[in-house]
Structure formats: structure tokens, C-alpha cells
Amino acid sequence: MIAHLPILQVVIPLLAAPLCMVVRIPRLAWTIALLASSGAFAISLLLLQTVLETGTVSYLLGGWPSPWGIEYRIDQLNAYVLLLVTSLGTIVLFSAPTSLGQELPADRHPLFCTAYLLCLAGLLGVTATGDVFNLFVFLELSSLSSYTLIALGSDRRALTAAYRYLIMGTIGATFILIGIGLMYMTTGTLNMYDLAQRLPEMSQPRTLLTAFAFFVTGVCLKLALFPLHQWLPNAYAHAPSVVTAFLAATATKVAIYVLVRFVYSIFGTEFSFSTMPLQTIFLIAALLGIFICSVSAIYQSNVKHIFAYSSVAQIGYMILAFSFGTATGLIAMLLHLFNHALMKGALFLAVGAVIYRVGSSQLQDFSGMGRHMPWTMAAIVAAGLSLIGVPLSVGFVSKWYLVVAALEQDMWPIAVLVLLGSLLAIAYVWRLVEVAYYQQADNAHVDVQEAPISLLIPIWTLVAANVYFGIDTRLTVGVSEMATRALFGAGP
Amino acid sequence: MNVLGLYNYWVVMVLMMLGFYIVISQGNLIKKIIGLSIFQASVFILYISMAKVAGGTAPILDESISTYSNPLPHVLILTAIVVGVATTALGLALVVRIRESYGTIEEDEIQAQDEEA
Amino acid sequence: MTAVAVVLMRDLFAVVMLTGIYSLLSASFFVVFDAVDVAFTEAAVGAGISTLLMLSTLTLTGRYAKESTQKPWLALAIVTVTGALLIYGTLDMPTIGSASAPIHQHVAPRYLNDSMQEIAVPNVVTSVLASYRGYDTLGESFVIFTAGIGVLALLMVLQRRRASDVDAHGPMHQHLILRIVAKILIPLILLFALYVQFHGDYGPGGGFQAGVIFAAAIILYSMLFGLSAARQTISQPLIFALSAVGVLLYGGVGVACMLLGGNYLDYDALAEDPVAGQHLGILLVELGVGITVASVMIIIFFTFNGRSLSERGRRR
């Protein structure tokens, strides 16, 4: 069975999805979904172990040799991302029935579980595949299901947010499709590994350049790089809380993985960074994103908006690290990829728990919650400290590597800017802390209780992970370093 | 370089950009979706164009024929058409819900209503 | 061309019709360029299903678009830059139809040369679709399944009151001739759908096209005899179950291959003789695609129209 792990990783949640729809009993559907996603989590652990021991695993779908058939190709990089997606997906799903209870009528819960599993399977499929067109298909699978998930939000603005995401997302997907088409046209192959072998020999620089530009633009739309991020804040703010936590922790991360895969493994650093002005463009977009979105976050009155803008800013940090084009930069980015998922997963779940009790995500309605919901607010503070980058939290680890990577390149102004960005993060986290701890609760909210235990367990699991991986960095740093070494070794 | 041989691609590109233009310039939600489907349909034409082999026929094997067009892009586009129609259906469902809760399908009017709230 | 008119028109009904024509035109283009399977699908989907869906939406949202007030300059600039980049990209492309282009050299020849021995299905598109790249097609049927889930989650009406109170007859109930013609036609369409389903090995066609045609027959029935009549003939839970059965059948074939010792979707493992296994596998997965597509199309159409009926009921 070990040989079949790569495909089981994706197929288990994929096939569990229609089952959820058929059973139609909310509890049972949720149980199936939870079993499937924990199964996927277990498999991703095994896969990571296998990859670390034996190196890259390849799985030929349909038994056809690549490049004729579709191949799954798991190396350290995507095993790491698979682990991230499945673990967050499982932990967040754990809190779904309670958190959704108020946001969605019970008869839609099975549909929710179906869409959730489809989204999870889509993201896993994107990460595991070694075929560019297959990547497109699964990307659309995950996108369509995430539009659905977002539209299930209780507010009518969820609909417009989902619509806008659908339009932007589909433009992105079509750009990616054009990029894939042009790549196929120049090389005659769709297999990623094969593409990487054949691209350097091809003599059609202009077509290739266009392919690259379209593909990267499409991916940047999906990963919400500033200024292509406009779909994100509203989508995160109005989606059901569980969905926000899930998408914030996984969807953009997978898009970033796709970017790394294409830039490093397929086109190679030389083409990406020398032939194309990618470095400069990304550097500028990332810095603008960090500052403009951090400042916007300070001025939001809706807590979910605050952290949604903060997400765009954090994506800016990842792209900034990426734009250095060095090994240390890539390590910093991969670390932040994982760490940011932990922070935002915890934050959005905890915010969701407050919303569950208070019934609103307005900053004003959080007043006094420090006393009424001590455990939940403590979790928000802990994850917020991690977001700022305080030592002993994961945020510190990734910021540290980022600054080191900047200094390595003698770009000390950028290192200073990164620290300035952290100050902005203090500002928006502080606003929430101030309201929650130093103001009295509204009269309407005086009898608000602590969140139910079924919400607190996943929240504190993630907070604990924030601290644990901030102290014991063997797993995250180790795998990131190995993945980076493999990527730089494989480049032409 | 044979300019005539590329003429078809250029027409496709113009069509693509027309669709793209409709998506980003129109304020009507249904028109945006129509624009998307034109954009996508034009990309399909691009793929099919590159599959053509001069003198070839449809890739259904037969003893008497020796040249076929490339079947792979056809397969990809079959898949892409399905993905496209799935997106359209979902988008339209959203439009219907938006119309029900806002009473309009014009982007600016929706924005105005949201800002009031 | 039609696309230009779409930009200018404000009557959404006409725009939808033009889009349908655009689809038909591109379908005929596909025939000229040898892509018969794609043409078949584009005609059925682009000109058929999409147009139908858009019309269903229009009945719910109203027909006219407002004059666009936004300044189009930014949009125009973006489009021009993107378009220029594309044109720039074409400069290096091989001319259309040249057989020496890399696209025809590397992967494709194997499909054309060896698929007869390996799979023995004359329609290469079918063998690539269902076997070589069968996993893509699995993903595709899940995408359409997702769309069904999405439409259901958004538009499903809680059926407290029976829909038949509102709508006793279909919109075209009064046309006696139409009804008689349809009664003869619908079984023929269903037969044709089955033919397309199982003939995909030899000619253009396959599960997807068959599913669309099958759904079209049911939709025609519901237009003529009313939605509630159609719902009585085909119960809704049954269609829900069928849409899941379709994708599960496809995925299940893959699992069966694995249990029989092959890789996922390796049909060789299904029978003693690899070619027979391939045949069986392709038949089953095409059936799965057909079932899913037909039931999802019916779900989508019924949900859209069920919505409009309950809307009308509420307004009364």
C-alpha cells in the first residue's frame, strides 16, 4: 500500500466528498469528512517520512509512463506543503459543526462538508501533481468549491464577495490556461519534470516569455499578491468563520507553492531572475503590499477585515523573501508559509469563536471580551504576538530568517523595512487588545460566556503549535533547508 | 517567418482580449460572466489551432489515413470546456442570489447599497 | 464579429443569443480544424446548456443592462498591454499546420501510433481522454459535480409547499402540436444519447456529450409538461444520488484497479487481457462521466427553475 500513498492522499478526500452528499445526515456527513481528512493527514505524515528517507517519489497514474500519462511527483517541497494543508484542514474541520451551527441551516451542512472536502482534495491535487494541465483541473476544483464555501456566509455581502472572487479567480485561471497552452506549444509536453528538461533547449524565447508572464500573473491573482488582492479582504471577511480559517491557512499557500514550483523547478532560477525582471517587480509589489495593507488593517472596523488585510501584508513578506532569489530567502519564505498558516488558522478560528458568542465581527462588539471569554482572547493575543514576531513564537523564526536573507544581500534598508512592518502589526493587534481588555462590554453582551470546548480545543492546538514550532524548529527549518537544497541543485 | 501562417492566432488574440475587456469594463454582472465565457472560448480556439496539422484529419484512426491532427489539445479542451461551463453555472447561481438580496445586478448600485449598510 | 456586438449591446437577451451564435461559430471552426469531439461538446455546451442557463437567469434578474458609467480607459489599457504581449508571443510560434512544430513531435506521436495496440480504440481522443489522461477526466467530472453542489447550496429552495401549487403546467403547455412532436422526439433523443455514450470509441462522442444530450431531453420534457410533472417522473433525491454515483463509479474503477494490483486507473489490471481491460475501464468511466454530467445538468436546471417558481409564488 505504501507505493500508492501519493494517490491515496488525494483520492480519499475526493471520494469521501460525494459520500457526504449522499448520507444527508449532518452529523454523519461531518464524521465522514473528519475521517477522510484525518486519513489524508496521516498519509501526508507517512509521505513526508518516505520522501525524507528515500528521496523523490513518483507515481504513474493509469500505469502510463510519463510524459504520456499523468504523473504524481512528491519531493520534500510538496510533501511539506501537503502536510501543512492536511493538518490545518483537519484541525479547522474539527470545529466546523459548532461554529457553523449559527451561520448555516442544518440541512446544508452535508453540502458544506462535500464542498470542504472537494476544496481540500483540489488543493492536495494541485500540490501533488507533476503535470501542468492536471494542476489546472485541480486548481479549478479547489477554486469552484471555495467560491461555494464563501457564498455560504450568512451576510448578503458574502455573495458579492464570492462573485468577485469568482470573476478574478477565473481570469487568473484563464491566464494560467494560456500560459500552459503556450508552454505546451513550445515544448510539446505537459509533464513538469519533462518541461524542465526541455525548456532550456527551446529556441522560441518570445513565446516562452509570454507563457511565463501569463502563468505568473495568473498565479499571482490566485495568491493575492498586491495589487491583485482586491478579492481577498471581502471574501475572508464575509465567509463563514471556518471557511475563512481554512482558506487563509491553505489556499494562498498552495498558490505560492505553485509559484515556487514553476519558477525554481520548471523555468529555473536563471531564466526567472535574469531574463525576466521578476525580482524587481516582486520586490516592489511585496513592499507596497506590506505597507499599504498593514496600514489599511489598522483602519478597519471589522475584526475579520483587519486580519484579512494583514494576510495580504504577510503574503507580501513571503514574496519579498522569494524575490531575493537566494537559498536563504527561499528558506525564509517556506518557513513563513508554514508559520503564517499556523498563526492565521489560530486567529481566524478564535475570532470565529467570539463571533459565535457575540454574533458580530465588528471591533466595537469585541469590547470587554478579555474578561468574558478569557481563553479565546488569550489565544488571539498569543497568535497576535506570533504575527508580530515576538521571540519564542513561530513568527519570530520566520522574521529572523527573512532579515538574515536581506542582510546577506546587503539590502539592509529592506531589513529595516521588515522591522517597521512589524511595528504596524503591533498597531493593529493592539487596537483589538485595547478594546477587548480595557473597555467594558456592551450592555447587550454582559452575559456572554466562554466559547464551547469544541471550539477551544482546535484553537489552542494551533496556538500550541505556534509556540512549539517557535522553539523546536527542527522539522520546519530542516525540511525547508532540504527542499531548498533540492531546488537549487535541480536548477540548470 | 510566415506572417500569413500566424494570422489566425492574431484573430484569436483579438477575440480573447475582447472577452477580457468585457469582463473588466462592464458593470453588469451577467455581462461579466458572458465576457468570461467568450474569453475562455477564445482560449479554446487557440489550443485547437495549435493542434492542426496541414493535410491531417480528425484523430480517429483508420487504415487509409496517414496524417492526423494532434489529439492531445482536443482532450485538454474537452476538459476545459467542462470546467468553463461549471464556472458559468456557479457564477449565474451567484448572480441570481445577488439579485434576490440586492434587487439589482449592476455593480455600482450594489456597491452603493453596501456602503450604506 | 459577434463578440464586438456583445460589448455594445445593452439588451441582455440579445447578448445571450449572440453568445450562443459565437459558440456555434467556434464549434464550426473546431470542425474545420479537425477537432470533431470538441466541436460536438462546444455546440452542446456553449450553444446549448450555457445559453439555456443564461436565459433561466435572465427570467430571474431582468433583461436590460444599464449604460456603463465606468471609465473604460484603465480597462482598455490593461487589455491593450495584455494583447500586445500575446501578439509578441506569437512572433516565434510555428505557423499553423506545420507538422514539424515541437507540439507534434514529442508526446503526441505515441498516442497516434501506439494507441491501437495498447487500447484498440480508433478514436484517439477517447483513448487519451479516458485512459492516458484519465485522471484529468476524473478531475473534470468532479469539477462539474462541484458546480452542482455549489448551485444546490446557493439556490436550493426548502420545499415546504408543494411546487405543483404554483405551476401546474409548463410554459408551453398550450401548444398541442409541440407536445405531440415532443412525445415522439424525446425517446429518440434519449436513444441518441445512449448511442453517443457507447459509440464514443469509434466516432466523436462519449460520456460527456451523451450526458448533455440526455439532460437536454429531460429539460425539454420539463419545459413542455411542467417542472412538477418532470419532478414526478424523476425524483429529486434520485438525481442527487445519481450525480454522486457517477463520480463514485469513476473513482471506484480507479480503486478497483488498485485492488487488482495495478496503479490507480490502470485498466490493464481489470481483465486478463490488457486490451479487454482497457475496453472495460473506458466503458465504465465514460458511463460514470455520463451519469454525473446528465444528473448535474438536470439538478442545475431544476434548481434554477424551481427558484423562479418559488419567487413567483412569493410575489403573488
Image: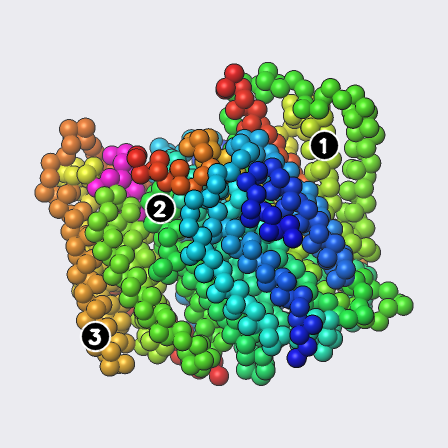
Position of residue C68 relative to residue A126, above or below, is above
> Quick check: A225 left or right of C203?
left
> Over which residues does the magenta segment extend?
A346-363
**SS class, disc 2:** helix
Asked whether residue A322 is in view, the answer is: no
Protein image colouring: rainbow
The residue labelled by disc 2 is A234
The residue labelled by disc 1 is C220
- The local crowd at label 3, few if under 14, some if 14 to 19, many if 20 or more residues have their Cα within 10 Å, is few
Q: Secondary structure at mark 1?
A: helix
Judging from the image, what secondary structure is the residue with disc 3 in? helix
Front-most of residues C21 and A289: C21
Q: Which chain contains the residue that carries disc 2? A: A
- Looking at the rendered structure, whether the residues under marks 1 and 2 are on a common chain is answered as no
Residue A126 falls left or right of residue A190: left
Q: Which residue position holds label 3?
A: A413
